[in-house]
Amino acid sequence: MAELVGAVDQGTTSTRFMVFDVEGREVARHQLEHEQILPRAGWVEHNPVEIWERTQTVITSALGSARLNLSDLAAIGITNQRETTLVWDRRTGLPVRNAIVWQDTRTDSIAKALDRDGRGDVIRERTGLPPATYFSGGKIQWLLENVDGLRRAAERGDVLFGTTDCWVVWNLTGGPDGGRHVTDVTNASRTMLMDLTTLDWDDELLGFFGIPRAILPEIVSSSHAEAYGTTTALRGAEVPITGVLGDQQAATVGQVCFSPGMAKNTYGTGNFMLLNTGTEPVRSKHGLLTTVAYRFGDEAPVYALEGSIAVTGSAVQWLRDQLGIISGASEIETLARSVEDSGGMYFVPAFSGLFAPYWRSDARGAIVGMSRFNTNAHLARATLEAICYQTKDVADAMVADVEANGGAIDLDVLRVDGGVTANDLCMQLQADILGVPVSKPEVAETTALGAAYAAGLAAGVWASTDALQANWHEAKRWEPTWSEEQRQAGYAGWRKAVERTLDWVEVD
């Protein structure tokens, strides 16, 4: 039997395909970026056709570079940007318009209306999510209300909705010619439409958004031998698609956080921290999301608390692209190391509001505590500290939620992955600000690896999660060096800075 597993990683800025062997080591990869379409302030879109074309190209190119064929793969897994919303014509396979990306804030008024009349409380209880622009339900409603003829087409069953995993699976398995219209429980749990306990679409919630059930995909397990079909759209052998996970859940699996109390933090465009809470959902009272971490086959689903932070790595991009104080992301570490601290400066990058644990769409970015003494170097250091302080906001909320539910958690180490982990100073600051060690694995591409693991479990490449845990090896660890007094003083300043960002814009 083939022991290689492929993984499509369809992310916010790029799509990549990777191949892993049975020990979780990278065998091949290819990656292509796609356009970020910004029609107006607060709007972020992707071209679904471009994403599908990029998906085909990266699969072909990755296999070709390693002199592999599709037949060399036991299975393919898929991971994806989660809440990004696509609607397409089931007969032609063409999208009705560009995808609305998870970062997009055009549905502010929809989210506010849900809270004003009490529907928001029902959404929180059923889905574990607050009404927010982040999630798919409001984006679907916006499309139905703003694309001519779309609602009538939806009611006739002529169009389909999906997050990008669903779009990729549908196209890989034939598109208009018999493509599978399915999604997994982790992606479905990010829509505001799925009941966390039944793991099915909820009719009352669909009514809140005016969404016909006929456009929704079937919800299946994250790891399943048959539910996703095979790759009929690619030249060569048909390979079973046997695993699908939203990107942050995939990183949780890739970091083998299979026991309650284990946590990982992914540093990308934003930060996403997940804490495994076991087979019972923990309802958050401190601004976190309750989400499905994964479900393997017919086993009970495993849940997580998640803290989603909108702007972390993209704050570094802002220093590069808008301010021009660095020419490349790697330069920020050198610049930040040229000073001993941030010189009393705090930077809260609330460019699109604040996500967890605040959920304030009225917030906007602020740089506070400045004096004539401060330089670009202090701003660079404050940017790295902002990444780490936002993570502490989330970690503290997780502890509070678990304790409020009668449990206890001792976060003794934080497993990290993503591009920012290459910044040694940032990771040291993270350990200092949290007061716990920070650990990075040898395989950095944990998101793609998690998708491969989910697929390989269903295909029999790995017999159990024990085999996956044996693959995990630490590459580097950062130990805290700050005193408790230093840690508390720094965080107190951060909380004051956050207060300055609130009530900045009016939200209808």
Image: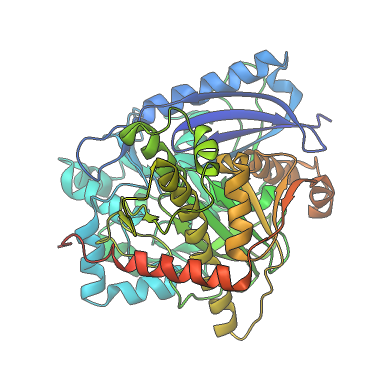
As drawn, which residue projects farthest toward the front?
Answer: 373
What residue appears at the point 82 percent right and 36 percent down from the top-left corner? Answer: 22
Residue 357 in view of the camera: no
- Residue drawn at (27%, 46%) of the image: 154
**Quadrant of the image for the C terminus?**
bottom left
Q: Where does residue 468 sit, x and y in percent of width and height?
A: 79, 48
Q: In the image, 459: left or right of 431?
A: right
- Vertically, is 30 above or below 409? above
- Residue 17 in picture, x, y percent from top left: 60, 28
- Choose between 205 and 263: the one closer to the eye: 263
Residue 21: x %, y % from top left: 79, 32
Identify whether 48 is placed above or below 376: above
Q: Position of residue 507 (x, y in %)?
A: 18, 62
Looking at the image, which residue is at 40% across and 47% down? 379
Which sits in the foreground, 157 or 22?
22
- The number of numbered badges drawn on the structure is 0
Classify residue 24 as left or right of residue 225. Answer: right
- The answer to whether residue 461 shows anywhere in this view is yes
